[in-house]
Amino acid sequence: MNPSFFMLHVNTTEQTTLRAPRRVPAFFRLPGQYLSFLLGLFISRIGDSLYTLAIPWISYELTRSALVMSSVYAVSVLPIVLFGPIIGVLVDHLPRKKLMLATDLARAALVALIPALHLAGVLQIGHLFAVSFCLAILNLLFDVAFVAAVPHLVPGKESLTRANAAEKLASQFSELIGPILAGLAIAAFGGYNALWIDALTFSATFLTLLKLPSMGTAVAAASFRKVLQGMKEGLHWLVTNRLNISLSLQAMVGNFGYSAAFGVLMYYQLDALGLTSQQSSLNYALLGAGGLLGTLAVVPLEKRFRRGVLIPVLLTVGMLGFTLIIWSRYWLMPGIAFGIVSLCNIGWNTLVQSLRQETVPSDMLGRVLGFSRMFTRLAMPLGAMAGAFLSARYGPAAVFALAAGAKLVEVLIALCSPIRRM
């Protein structure tokens, strides 16, 4: 793909017909190599949907235990909390392109290990825990390296929001159609064999990465003392920069509330509303559709409104989304409400990712993101536990009220911090 539009020298009478490229959607006014990589990322994340659906299925096949299924999810979140800062240092000290290539190869091998062990007749539940734990580390390593590399792939601050929105669009579209394709694959080949397909999808990002230029200059290899010093510098930069720590606090509060609400969503649909599986699936599809709308809306909205205005407005609309589900028992309301929340969350995430890339020095970005993600992801299991407790004691409506309250706190953080001046 050509990274720029063709420059055509024409006379005045021809200019009217040759201005069409300006009407190309904003998402495609990006370097061709970056768009090619997003296509590979889209295919890879389709594979992630296979893994997301197959692992609970395999866990159930091995143990018939809901507790074990939940524990596998918890194990997949734990490495983010434990190793986020260290991963940030690695991203800042190693060549990002080579790091992402090695990560893709390692992830493919890990995923393929599960069906391979099954074929050998030795697969145990402990293998799933180990693979989920290691895969979470590699996923975080790849994601942080990608975010840190975007400013090198898409030069110019004015293009960052568009580039991040395009990445979110690819991710949300994969989350919309991925579960459908994953369900078909598992039905056709079984949960174990579907993972072979997932392993192959990592080649999509690997091959597109090979064509990309270097993404930042690597720092010389660090000793253990320097690694610790680097972590300290990243933490200090984050907590002393009022804008970025405010964004992290928003994410912590938001993850807590959303995890609480999302954790009881299926229970609410099946138990409180008595929906069928088809009706529940439609509600989840609306959630994905909301995310897609968020990626499409954020770029034109940013052109019309300052980020300091847009961020609290998005959070307020998300709060109203959670409020809707409290007052209405219409069977499509869970999908409508969570779709609104998803739209606002994706818009917020896109804007914040651009702010990070613009305000954090490139050689610090990995470390700052590592600590930020550690703090923000820690709130997810805590939120899920709080949601389970509230739902059991007071019902799901109390959980949705908690999530709405968390959104209100996010709005207040935006209004009382440097975010409002952006």
Image: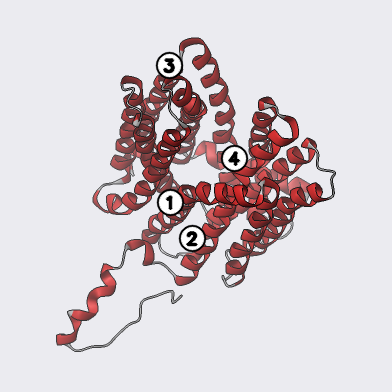
Characterize the local packing of mark 1: few (<14), some (14-19) or many (20 or more) Cα atoms within 10 angstroms. Answer: many
Mark before the other along the chain sequence, 1 or 3: 1
Mark before the other along the chain sequence, 3 or 2: 2
* Element at label 3: helix
Q: Nearer the viewer, mark 3 or mark 2?
A: 3
* Element at label 4: helix
* Element at label 1: helix
In the rendering, at what x and y percent does residue 35 appear?
Answer: 46, 66
Tell me the tag on residue 151.
2
Pointer 4: what residue? 371
State left or right for residue 304 relative to residue 95. left
Residue 403 versus residue 228: which sits nearer the camera?
403
State the CA–CA distance, disc 3 to disc 2.
Answer: 42 Å
Mark before the other along the chain sequence, 3 or 4: 4
Residue type, label 2: Pro
Residue type, label 1: Ser
Tell me the tag on residue 195.
none
Pointer 1: what residue? 354
State the CA–CA distance, disc 2 to disc 4.
Answer: 20 Å
Q: Residue 79's image quarter?
A: top right
Q: Residue at x 35, y 81 (%)?
A: 6
Pointer 3: what residue? 398
State the CA–CA distance, disc 1 to disc 3.
Answer: 34 Å
